[in-house]
């Protein structure tokens, strides 16, 4: 163990010295753009018309530059962004000139909170602590659809939601908009001399994106300008009271049982200081949460499903650890699965309030303290989970579950931190964990370059653990460049008895090596945007050094057009060592079992994606080649039709046709989505999914009314059918119909 610790320390020292050498060699950051915003004596009317005299004195931003299609070029259209504030809110207005008028503006999305990836839009990044680590993103399109996101490192979670207001309108020169972001909405450092600030405009019809501040054709909380002048603002009492009430009717067709229940719940949010929040939830109800996308598992290890519940998404960035997952851990590496990248997380909130099979478990009450204290970022969460009966095994008693996370800012953009958890939401056994991490970042190198590195260590204690290591550790180093050379290296080891009961592990007792290297050439052409070639690699060995999995993904050609069409060729060489027979497929009639042994196989294929700003768009992915000791053909795709901003239809299909000496089987996944937006406040979304492995067809229909930010009404119907004996006859399995009304009172 002592030798292993010495080796780990040597690796860490080499990593940090290498990162520091890169910083010294590449030099210092360029001068920072700065605006000083005025204080208003009266607020603007948020109607999208930027015609009030008060805007004449606002800070003006008009020095934009492209990052797409040609980095650094002047924009093809004129843009003006105005910024001001009063005691209650930050106000942002924009005038966007657009040749061709309304018809040239992409504005297909009408549902509040939806991603605006295919629409013309404005996007704002705010860093209220000016620490290059904290970021909130606000987007608006021509339909006045608001979308907000929370940055986790330099990637973002699109499911985070807060209260703010925006309105956009068509003008004779293009379009304009106004935004109000209340100071009650965001935590911030009241003593900070400046906020980090950035603004982007997307012009989808031209494949163009322009920014105020950018580096290396990208932007995030570490790549922002400075917004000065905010002082003496009012956050009120700092209390949000969010009562809601739901009526739910459930029926199980197999048992004949049915029940109706009225479920009131209460959420309280209190801002202890301008930068520190406390929250309390009582009888939390997640019945209105969107369904997970259906997946078929052809591996020996578990799948990863992201968190979608609002209570856990708020301030979720404060609980992230070591850049594990969250898009930071070699997110573009196509040799590794999402589950492999996320493996080793010490805290994964989906473990709370959900059983291993995905069934809801009552959360009777919970509390959270999160925010900033000086240079410290802190997050503490405790919930009381109710009793539940698993699909198999003994009943699990209710338990108090807790997590504490703290990290301190060090250097210019780096941090060092601690995490601890206690309690096991999936069993009656005691469990605890502690861990430490260091995250290094320098995004201010000449030429728009940046360097990232991290090191982390964890140790778990579980009553279920037997002999073996309880520890886990990881190291990583990346040059995440979008133009020129890109490089990433990482290693992590998860001990055989590493059991983070509130975390996520796809497999333990392994050491995982991952890396990627590639080169991007930005092309200044009329239709071609960029070319990329590279190779990704992942090698997983047992702690004894024996190979378990190895994947080399060669990417000889990837091209992207100005209209965001992407063509990608892939050639993959894989190795798998099965120490035990592996049942890769099972139904009521038979099982397909792979014998233990060493397998080496290869396949090839392509991916094609079209820009989603069009009325018709889609994607297709095809693979063909060897698979273990047989072969596989797979085809997947999706077609999206948006004839207008009021209607969107989507149909997807994935099939795997697998021939093995042990037997042939075919897997199918089908999904269709219909989205009807009556206006920007009322929408109706229906999702139908089916896979032939579980033989379950599921339907969810959600009517969502958002009269204004902070007010929501849901009507949700879930129905599932199952063909248990695979005779082609589907029978109803369960139905749940629920209605929920929530309202936010802000003081």
Image (tube, rainbow, N blue to C red):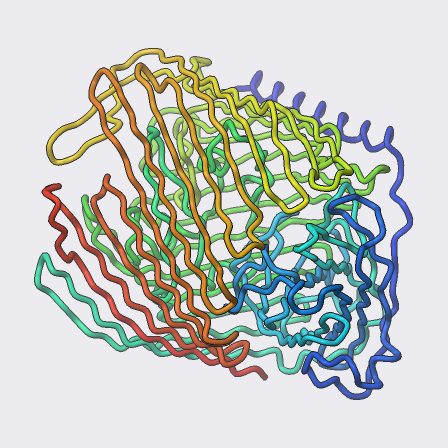
**Is residue 589 rendered to the left or right of residue 468?**
left
Number of numbered discs on residues: 0
Residue at 78% across / 88% down in the picture?
42
Look at the image and tell me whether residue 322 can be seen: no
The picture places residue 558, in percent across and down from the top left corner, at 61, 31
Q: List the single residue furthest toward the right.
A: 31
**Is residue 324 rendered to the left or right of residue 128?**
left
- The quarter of the picture where the C terminus appears is bottom right
Q: Is residue 573 above or below residue 688?
A: above
The picture places residue 447, in percent across and down from the top left corner, at 84, 37
Look at the image and tell me whether residue 32 can be seen: yes
Residue at 31% across / 56% down in the picture?
688
The picture places residue 465, in percent across and down from the top left corner, at 34, 33
Q: Nearer the viewer, residue 483 or 271?
A: 483
Q: Nearer the viewer, residue 688 or 327?
A: 688
Residue at 32% across / 17% down in the picture?
578
**Is residue 305 rendered to the left or right of residue 611?**
left
Q: Is residue 168 above or below residue 665?
A: below
Residue at 35% across / 43% down in the picture?
653
Q: Is residue 282 above or below residue 628?
A: below
The picture places residue 268, in percent across and down from the top left corner, at 49, 75
């Amino acid at each position: 163990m002592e030798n292993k610790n010495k080796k780990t320390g040597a690796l860490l020292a080499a990593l940090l010295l290498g990162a520091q050498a890169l910083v010294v060699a590449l030099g210092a950051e360029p001068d920072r753009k700065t605006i000083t915003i005025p204080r208003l004596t009266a607020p603007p009317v948020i109607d999208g018309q930027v015609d009030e005299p008060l805007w004449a004195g606002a800070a003006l931003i008009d020095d934009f530059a492209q990052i797409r299609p040609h980095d650094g070029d002047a924009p093809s259209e004129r843009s003006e962004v105005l910024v001001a504030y009063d005691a209650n809110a930050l106000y942002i207005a924009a005038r966007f000139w657009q040749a061709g008028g309304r018809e040239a503006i992409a504005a297909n999305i009408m549902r509040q909170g939806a991603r605006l990836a295919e629409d013309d839009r404005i996007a704002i990044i705010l860093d209220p602590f000016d620490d290059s680590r904290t970021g909130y993103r606000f987007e608006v399109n021509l339909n006045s659809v608001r979308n907000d996101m929370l940055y986790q490192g330099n990637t973002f979670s699109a499911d985070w939601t807060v209260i703010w207001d925006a309105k956009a309108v068509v003008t004779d020169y293009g379009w304009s908009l106004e935004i109000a972001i209340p100071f009650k909405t965001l935590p911030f450092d009241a003593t900070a001399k400046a906020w980090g600030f950035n603004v982007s405009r997307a012009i989808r019809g031209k494949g163009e994106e322009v920014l105020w501040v950018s580096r290396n054709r990208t932007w995030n909380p570490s790549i922002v300008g400075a917004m000065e002048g905010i002082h003496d603002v009012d956050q009120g009492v700092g209390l949000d009271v969010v009562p809601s009430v739901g009526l739910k009717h459930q029926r199980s067709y197999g048992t004949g049982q049915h029940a109706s229940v009225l479920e009131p719940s209460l959420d309280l949010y209190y801002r202890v200081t301008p930068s520190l929040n406390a929250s309390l939830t009582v009888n939390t109800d997640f019945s209105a949460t969107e369904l997970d996308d259906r997946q078929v598992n052809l591996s020996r290890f578990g799948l990863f499903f992201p968190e979608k519940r609002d209570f856990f998404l708020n301030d979720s960035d404060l609980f992230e650890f070591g850049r594990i997952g969250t898009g930071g851990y070699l997110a573009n590496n196509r040799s590794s699965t999402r589950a492999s990248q996320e493996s080793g997380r010490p805290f994964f909130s989906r473990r709370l309030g959900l059983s291993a099979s995905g069934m809801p478990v009552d959360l009777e009450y919970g509390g959270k303290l999160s925010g900033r204290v000086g240079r410290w970022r802190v997050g503490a969460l405790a919930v009381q989970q109710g009793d539940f009966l698993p699909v198999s095994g003994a009943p699990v008693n209710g338990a108090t579950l807790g997590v504490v996370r703290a990290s301190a800012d060090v250097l210019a953009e780096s941090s060092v931190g601690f995490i601890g958890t206690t309690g096991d939401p999936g069993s009656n056994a005691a469990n605890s964990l502690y861990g430490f991490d260091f995250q290094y970042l320098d995004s201010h190198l000449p030429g728009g370059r940046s360097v990232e590195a991290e090191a982390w260590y964890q140790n778990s204690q579980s009553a279920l653990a037997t002999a073996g290591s309880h520890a886990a550790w990881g190291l990583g180093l990346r040059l995440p460049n979008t133009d020129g050379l890109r490089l990433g290296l990482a290693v992590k080891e998860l001990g055989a008895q590493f059991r983070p009961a509130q975390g996520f592990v796809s497999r333990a007792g392994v050491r995982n090596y991952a890396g990627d290297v590639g080169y991007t050439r930005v092309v200044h052409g009329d239709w071609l945007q960029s070319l990329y070639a590279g190779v990704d690699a992942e090698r997983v060995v047992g702690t004894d050094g024996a190979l378990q999995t190895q994947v080399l993904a060669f990417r000889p050609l990837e091209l992207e057009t100005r209209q965001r069409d992407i063509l990608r060729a892939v050639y993959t060489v894989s190795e798998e060592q099965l120490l035990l027979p592996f049942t890769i497929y099972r139904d009521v009639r038979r099982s397909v079992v792979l014998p233990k042994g060493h397998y080496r196989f290869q396949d090839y294929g392509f991916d094609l994606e079209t820009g989603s700003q069009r009325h018709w768009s889609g994607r297709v992915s095809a693979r063909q080649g060897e698979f273990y000791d047989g072969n596989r053909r797979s085809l997947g795709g999706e077609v999206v039709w948006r004839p207008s901003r009021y209607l969107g239809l989507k149909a997807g299909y994935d099939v795997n046709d697998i021939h093995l000496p042990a037997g042939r089987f075919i897997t199918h996944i089908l999904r269709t989505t219909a989205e009807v937006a009556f206006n920007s406040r009322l929408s109706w979304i229906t999702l139908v999914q089916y896979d032939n492995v579980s033989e379950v067809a599921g339907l969810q229909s959600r009517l969502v009314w958002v009269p204004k930010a902070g007010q929501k009404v849901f009507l949700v119907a879930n129905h599932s059918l199952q063909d248990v004996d695979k005779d082609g006859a589907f029978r109803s399995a369960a139905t749940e119909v629920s209605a929920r009304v929530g309202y936010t009172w802000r003081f």
